Amino acid sequence: MLILGYNEITKDFHSLIVDKDVPQGDHFLRGDPTDRATLLRAGIEKEDTLIVALEDDEDSIYAVALSRELNPKIKIGAIVKKAENVDKIYAAGADYVILESDVLSREIIRFLLVPRAASFFDRVVLSDELEIIGVDLPKEYEGKRIMDTDIRRRIGTVIAVKRKDKIIKAPSPKLPLQKGDTLLFLVERKEINKIREMMGQWIYHRD
Amino acid sequence: MWSSFPLKNRLLIFLLMLISTILVGSLGYVIIKTYVEHESTSLTNAIFFSIATISTLGHYPRGIELTSDVGKWFTILYLILGMGTIFGGIQALVSPWIEMKIRNAIKERKIPIPKDAHVVLCGWNDIAREVGEYLQMVDIPFVIVAKDAPLNFPGVNGDPGDMDALKLANVERASALIALLDEKKNVVITLTARRLNREMRIIALSEREESKNLLIKSGVDVVISREKLLRSLLDHWIKGDFTHIFSGEIFGDLKIKELSVGKDMAGKSLKELRFRERVGTAIGIYRRGLLITNPKAEEILKEGDIVIFMEGENHADTGIQ
């Protein structure tokens, strides 16, 4: 993984960080992250993932466009500050864009209006106490409705069903399950092993 | 034309015009006195004549006034020119200031500041704008305290670290305060606001996780760490786990809500209440500080429980708190 921009967010990622002003060290490369030669020197052509988090949105947009040109296959995640730049950086070739003010304002609103739900999210998103896992639908449940199976008793509440590229949130107990569905559960980390024993090979941590 | 110049430049232009007006008057005076009236004169007399004329003093001491016809006509014309410089100049200097005063007076009265149970937003930036727009949408009263508070929301123009500015925003009776500036400023805001209101909830933004303790010691209830939040979102994206898909949903809309259990619901199970159909999918219950995940349908609710649930697509906007 390669990171463009050295700052509070990226400084603890243990990957090569490129920026004009970086400390001495093995995983730092001093140079202009919007410069073609610097990116090539950082080995962008061989990387599979790129994080772009530069101080200036315009620099980030340019760096994404340049990286996309140098490596068409790389996965690019980026952080921008201004809302109008979200579309631009997607157009430049980013796969995942975080709008800073959007994420922070939603977090503030949640702590203001639904503080318990907000701290609940934080357990899922910020700490590893709670985790969302995916379980491929076992054959025996194909064609059955959620309410007619023992899924809820054995694992827990199905919070969503991933069907192809769609996510059905908070599915109705009457939803008939189909072949190829992935069921999503929210579980405590310490329960994961228990579920793994029960469900065998069907458990997935990754998408 | 005047108002397009900044105040400092306007002052400079005014002084230059004043000096050149005096120079023109003095020069004309010396020429007329010497070549028309054939009298001797001095530089002091010339400047005295100029200033006495443009300031409309109305009286010249003996020996200073121009007595010839040419001299009288010069005095008349010069008086008109000089008055223009003085009155025009002063107006140009003072009017923007008066305009600003009037505009501020109108601005503060346009949208009334909420009196109680409102939210005080400290600082004006993209985050404040988004929070403000959301609060407006759900009809929660709020006021913005910032040096550059916008006109289209209730606002107080001032430093949110100042007691006076916070008092203008009725912080004493606010239900929550949100500090959106840097850590240093947020600490000062919190310490100031806490002296006015012990009860309200204070939420503060922090650039770095390490400032969290300092903010909490100052009186903040919830610290939102920009670094930690953005970092963990990136982390989940890199890992490509399911949390990432969901955090997208979580940050995309506010579908996960909470409900506190009152007398009417206590003692009944989720199943009996038909919670799933009527409210949403319960994913956790906070009971006396403990979190129960994946509550069973047979789980019996107790008074004071807080149920965290996901709203299904079919029933929007039910049961916030």
Image (tube, rainbow, N blue to C red):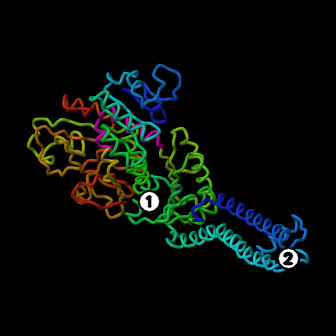
- The kind of residue tagged 1 is Gly
Residue B120: give x, y in percent of width and height. 51, 60
Residue in the image at 23% along x and 48% along y: A169
Q: Residue at x 26, y 58 (%)?
A: B279
- Viewer-proximal residue among B31 and A44: B31
- Residue of label 1: B132
**Label 1 neighbourhood size at 10 Å, few (<14), some (14-19), many (20+)?**
many
Q: Return the residue nearer the eye: B83 or A67.
A: B83
1 or 2: mark nearer the eye:
2
Instruction: Left or right? Give the position of B56 relative to A131.
Output: right
Q: Is residue B240 magenta?
A: yes
Task: Answer with mark 1 or mark 2, whichever residue precedes in sequence.
Answer: 2
Q: Percent position (x, y) of residue B133?
A: 41, 60
Q: Position of residue B316 (x, y in %)?
A: 26, 60
On-image quarter of the N terminus of chain A: top left
Q: Which residues are magenta?
A: B225-247
Could you tell me which chain the residue with mark 1 belongs to? B
Residue type indicated by callout 2: Glu
